[in-house]
């Protein structure tokens, strides 16, 4: 390629000062510091310069748009990337209710109000309003947790991985032994592998039984003077089928009592209501192992409980005192937002009907398939009217999932709005929807985009539809990605 062609292109690159006079940039210049504008423009020009210098054919350069509007648009994108929030609300149209990547449980209105209250003000986080003396932050939820679960003491830490780690470190750190069935050594989403958590807690893992069958006698044989804990772990995200045997909490408790060894049950997804009353399979409630005499139960705040990220430990006071006295508790301490949201969420459980009504996760979990069908059809009809000619809008009836390592075998009846376009493939459509404000996270299946109603709240449907229409119109106008 003749060198002078490159030179000519380089000379076409405008000076930053000239670009700053562009109307769109002058407008945004009133809202953002000038230094940001200048930096963005310098970056854009530097990128173009480097592209020109590296180009190997004239064709590449001919396709390049060096007009003021094009350079301005690039700079605006960069500025937006800096000034607009990164972490933001999205619509979860995946049909997976508890999606760790989407922040798990959305909070109930009462929890949001509580967070806003203590967040924008001072609070009685660690002061007794009665005596004026220092108190413990955990008191705000301890009594409530005890009332709801039947335990006589409780503690809240950052997440359930932290709860398990802390309990093991407190009761079995320093090389004491913890007996676990081989069928329960789970990995949860890569970041939580039970054997690794145990090792890092300083406890020694003693595996008993086989992958599919463990008996009480296996546990009994493994007990020795170093044994500090019998541990049961809920198989949250998988199920072993066929020729299986496992030891129930009641039998473990009996064995533990005979030898004076505490029993802990990591439930993972802590549920407080009996889901089998609502057409779902039975899932052990936190109350159940407590009633069976288990000494410690750990569970997550943001799985089926439907609250903020937290790890809850409930059980016998004697063991909780040991845990509370562990220095590591301070490192896993929850903040006031978590406590505020958790307290408000837990309080709803005092009245089960209210909990089912107001906690988004429970609502999504229990709403009837036919209600979702009616909602999907109404939305699809409106959508068809708005963007009908550019897209094919339909309905499908794929199943939805609970997700978050909860109820792995449950497929919930659901209903989806389907989207297809002759011009834009499904992957691009889904990508375009993710650029919306708020972004919409969809599923792609067999060349169609599916928007599942089960993981959307009814009260956000209006905004969802508006966002959808805007994004789809913009994509139709641009012939693809926005
Ligand atoms: C999800 C889960 C955990 C981890 O809980 P986080 O709150 O995500 O830290 C631990 N144990 C079991 C059995 C789980 O299902």
Image (cartoon, rainbow, N blue to C red):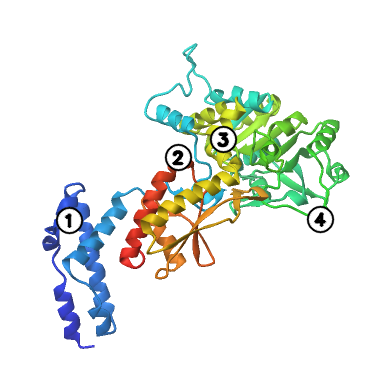
Mark 4 and mark 1 lie on one chain; the one further toward the N terminus is: 1
Residue 139 seen in render: yes
| Quarter of the rendered structure image containing ligand 1 | top right
Residue 454 seen in render: no
Q: Nearer the viewer, residue 70 or 160?
A: 70
Which quadrant would the N terminus be assigned to in this image? bottom left
**Closer to the observer: label 1 or label 3?**
1
Asked if the residues shown at circle 1 and circle 2 are in contact, with their CB atoms under 8 angstroms apart, the answer is no
Would you say 83 lies left or right of 103 here?
left
Would you say 465 lies left or right of 367 here?
left
Query: Dot 3 corresponds to which residue?
Result: 157
Q: Position of residue 24 (x, y in %)?
A: 17, 56
- The disc at residue 176 is none
Q: Residue at x 28, y 58 (%)?
A: 78
The residue carrying pointer 2 sits among few (fewer than 14), some (14 to 19) or many (20 or more) residues within 10 Å by Cα, namely: few
**Closer to the observer: label 3 or label 4?**
4
Relative to 55, say whether 93 is above or below.
Answer: above
Marks 4 and 2, how far apart at CA: 43 Å
* Badge 1 element: helix
Mark 1 and mark 3 lie on one chain; the one further toward the N terminus is: 1
**Closer to the observer: label 4 or label 2?**
2
Query: Dot 1 corresponds to which residue?
Result: 25
Marks 1 and 2, how far apart at CA: 37 Å
- The disc at residue 242 is 4
* Badge 4 element: loop
Asked if the residues shown at circle 3 and circle 4 are in contact, with their CB atoms under 8 angstroms apart, the answer is no
Query: Dot 2 corresponds to which residue?
Result: 459
Q: Position of residue 466 (x, y in %)?
A: 37, 49
């Amino acid at each position: 390629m003749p060198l002078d062609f490159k030179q000519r292109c380089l000379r076409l690159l405008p000076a930053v000062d000239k670009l700053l006079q562009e109307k769109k940039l002058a407008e945004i210049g009133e809202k953002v510091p000038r230094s940001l504008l200048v930096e963005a423009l310098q970056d854009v020009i530097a990128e173009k310069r480097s592209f020109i210098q590296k180009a190997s054919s004239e064709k590449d350069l001919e396709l390049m748009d060096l007009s003021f509007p094009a350079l301005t648009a690039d700079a605006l994108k960069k500025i937006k990337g800096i000034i607009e929030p990164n972490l933001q609300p999205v619509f979860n149209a995946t049909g997976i209710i508890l999606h760790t990547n989407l922040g798990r449980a959305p909070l109930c209105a009462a929890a949001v109000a509580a967070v806003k209250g203590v967040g924008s003000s001072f609070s009685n986080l660690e002061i007794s309003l009665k005596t004026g003396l220092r108190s413990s932050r955990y008191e705000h939820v301890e009594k409530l947790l005890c009332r709801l679960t039947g335990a006589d003491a409780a503690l809240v830490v950052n997440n359930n991985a932290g709860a398990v780690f802390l309990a093991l470190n407190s009761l079995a750190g320093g090389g004491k032994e913890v007996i676990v069935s081989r069928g329960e050594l789970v990995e949860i989403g890569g970041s939580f592998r039970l054997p690794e958590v145990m090792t890092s807690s300083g406890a020694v893992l003693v595996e008993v039984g086989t992958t599919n069958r463990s008996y009480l006698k296996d546990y009994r044989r493994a007990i020795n003077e170093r044994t500090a804990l019998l541990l049961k772990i809920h198989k949250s995200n998988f199920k072993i089928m066929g020729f299986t045997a496992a030891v129930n909490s009641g039998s473990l408790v009996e064995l533990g009592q005979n030898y004076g060894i505490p029993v802990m049950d990591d439930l993972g997804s802590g549920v407080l209501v009996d889901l089998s009353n609502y057409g779902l399979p039975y899932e052990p409630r936190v109350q159940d192992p407590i009633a069976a005499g288990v000494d410690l139960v750990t569970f997550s705040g943001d799985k089926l409980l439907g609250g903020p990220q937290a790890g809850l430990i409930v059980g016998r006071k004697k063991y909780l005192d040991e845990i509370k006295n562990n220095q590591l508790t301070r490192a896993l301490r929850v903040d006031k937002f978590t406590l505020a949201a958790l307290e408000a969420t837990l309080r709803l459980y005092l009245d089960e009907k209210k909990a089912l009504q107001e906690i988004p996760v429970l609502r999504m979990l229990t709403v009837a398939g036919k209600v979702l069908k009616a909602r999907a059809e109404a939305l699809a009809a409106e959508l068809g009217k708005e963007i009908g000619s550019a897209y094919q809008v339909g309905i499908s009836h794929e199943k939805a999932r609970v997700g978050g390592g909860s109820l792995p075998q449950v497929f919930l009846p659901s209903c989806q709005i389907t989207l297809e376009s002759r011009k834009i493939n499904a992957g691009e459509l889904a990508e375009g929807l993710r650029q919306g404000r708020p972004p919409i996270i969809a599923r792609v299946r067999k060349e169609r985009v599916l928007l599942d109603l089960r993981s959307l709240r009814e009260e956000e449907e209006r905004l969802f539809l508006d966002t959808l229409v805007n994004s789809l119109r913009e994509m139709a106008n641009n012939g693809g990605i926005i």
